[in-house]
Image (cartoon, helix red, strand yellow):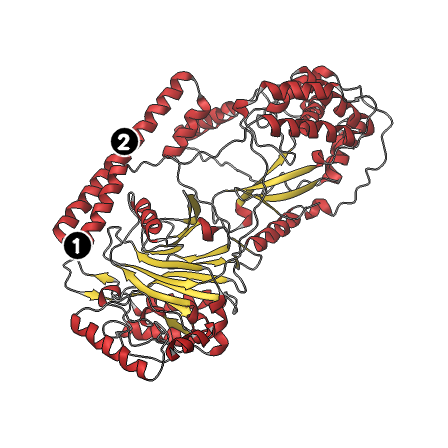
Amino acid sequence: MIRNKKLKDMTLEDWTLRSKGVQHATEEEWRTSTSSSRADEVDGPKPKGRSAVDVPGSERKVRCWKEKYCIGTWNVRSMNLGKLEVVKQEMARINIDILGISELKWMGMGDFNSDDYHVYYCGQESRRRNGVALIVNKRVGKAVMGYNLKNDRMMSIRIQGRPFNITIIQVYAPTSIAEETETEQFYEDLQHLLELTPKKDVLLILGDWNAKVGSQEIKGTTEKFGLGVQNEAGQRLIEFCQENKLVITNTLFQQHKRQLYTWKSPDGQHRNQIDYILCSQRWRSSIQSAKTRPGADCGSDHQLLIAKLQLKLKKAGKTTGLVMYNLNQISYEYTVEVKNRFKELDLVDRVPEELWIEACNTVQEAATKTIPKKRKCKKAKWLSNEALQIAEKRRETKCRGDRESYRKLNADFQRIARRDKRAFLNEQCKEIEKNNRKGKTRDLFRKIGDIRGKFCAKMDMIKDKNGRDLTEAEDNKKRWQEYTEELYQKVLDIPDNPDNIVADLEPDILESEVKWALDSLANNKASGGDGIPVELFKILKDDAVKVLHSICQQVWKTQQWPEDWKRSVYIPIPKKGSAKECSNYRTIALISHASEVMLKIIQGRLQQYGDRELPEVQAGFRRGRGTRDQIANMRWIMEKAREFQKNIYFCFIDYAKAFDCVDHSKLWQVLKEIGVPDHLIHLLRNLYSSIRAAHQQPEAGLLTSRIE
């Protein structure tokens, strides 16, 4: 009775986190532990599963965090054919939220979605060696703030939490046979990565360290529940932990040896503990348990190491991107509703801004109500259920310790995975042939690109002016804004006073011009800031032409553009070179399709003036002309020069950012010199003088601040 009362009086802070899954190898060990626990009860009640490391009272505040997360690290010995699906299956079975991967052996770097998981990875550029990755589930993925892909041996992600953010680093250390310089370079790079981590962050470092720290107790770093004898690499790891106030969580909890070793030799005779999860000493009380899961299997000789901890993550707010309509299912109700509402519009002598807003709202409201949204097509899974079932049998065989059956099932899995891959490619080829027969060229080339095209992962990490990696989304947005402003600074610094209205107007715009401009716009193109694709105007036919003609005519007279027509969205598309450099991106501008109608009309009016100035030999940027004749002439000259043994010299000039750095003041001057009317020049000046832009990160919907 007295003992129960004492237990009730104990506060939450008097309890330590319990060590789960303690097992005993023999009956003698069980008896010894039972007798020792009874002896402890004589002195008073003992909290269950007390951690081997004493925790100061000032650090116990983390125990009030309710949410539990499971993190792990696994050396998969190359993520080859079909292994990613097996790893995701194991993550779902064990409920792992964050999994670090060592020895990935993928080339390149970036991140991508795979079903309900998000994969961040970093490997070598040209060789399938080393490589690390971090896989997070949906629960954690919503809180990821950014990532830092250091090199093929280490990377990190930063997660938004409360009250402090969490930084998780995944590493793959050099083996014991590596040169000392390589090992020292690894620890130097890791130290530099730690210096970039904010001091207040909850820090976790996981991975394959290829080191044995042993079972000896080192205050503040390890406890006596390690495995094996410390080696030279283990001593280097301990020194690193002491320098950075880190604790090795594998050694904090008493476990059966089967849940301590992380690597087993192929013959099963040797077992070592070389994978570790490190945590800041300040946050070690949040670790509930750390052990291996021998039952997990992915065809590797390493065991899955997991740690359960208490954290509280902050969910990131949802980003609202543009609505993507399924343009193959534009309903008849949309056409009827928009036509009826267009007939009620007052089109005579209206301010262009007001008239456009009414027309835009009409189209958007009707489309939202009647047209279904476009769903993202998930990538086809080529690995069959048969292969996944064999992987499950292989895991069960591993638990039983039947090595012969395990080897056979492992060979069967690889054979069936190769068969499934071939079957998937054959099916894709059949679809390509079918699209070719039916004349569906768009689907045809998309399929060919999916099969032949090099996988290009997203890269949301760029460098600042000084070459420092920016890992967080907010920093990336500011850098894009800074880069774009610098790119157009020459244009922005030019004083321009387009407020005066030109009285001598050109002939009015005809409805036939609007119809020609609307029909000439290509389908299946990304919409601008208003989110209205051109197909929603084209299907309305004469009704859309009438409304757009009225808006364009008012812009023509007043020389004032609607605000939506002056706004563009820049999409960065990577070119060759490092994807971390802003200069290695093409900034594609998306503008309103309705404004393209007006620009097409102006271009048609300017065409006659431009054709008079362009020489006959110019083929680029001219309709109905190509560069075939020029290329043929160059080849003929080269052949003749080789025949008569004469030297020949060609000069190729490529202007960097040529169209982005046009001097607008000189452009207006040149247009005036070649005879372009003042009315057309003033229209263009009014557009470019007040244009606004924003950067959008693909698939993220994140916009930078406006660039004016």
Residue located 50% across and 50% down the image: 142
Write down the quadrant of residue 250 in the picture.
bottom left
Is 122 situated above or below 210? above
Residue located 55% across and 48% down the image: 583
Disc on res. 423 = 2
Tell me: 563 left or right of 582. Answer: right
- In which quadrant will I find the N terminus? bottom left
Tell me: 622 left or right of 8. Answer: right
Tell me: 376 left or right of 618. Answer: left
Image x and y of residue 372, in percent:
54, 28
- Disc 2 marks which amino acid? Ala
Taking depth in this image into account, of 619 and 520 the one nearest to the observer is 520
Q: Which residue is mark 1?
A: 400
* Residue 376 visible, this angle: yes
Write down the quadrant of residue 617 in the picture.
top right
Image x and y of residue 484, in percent:
63, 47
| Disc nearer the start of the sequence (1/2) | 1
Taking depth in this image into account, of 633 and 420 the one nearest to the observer is 420
User: SS for tag 2?
Assistant: helix
Residue extending farthest bottom: 43
Image x and y of residue 271, in percent:
20, 65
User: SS for tag 1?
Assistant: helix
Image x and y of residue 483, in percent:
61, 50
Is 340 situated above or below 24? above
Circle 1 Cα neighbour tier, 10 Å, few/some/many (<14 / 14–19 / ≥20): few
Taking depth in this image into account, of 549 and 176 the one nearest to the observer is 549
Residue extending farthest right: 503
What distance separates the C-alpha of mark 1 from that of mark 2? Answer: 33 Å
The label nearer to you, 1 versus 2, is 1
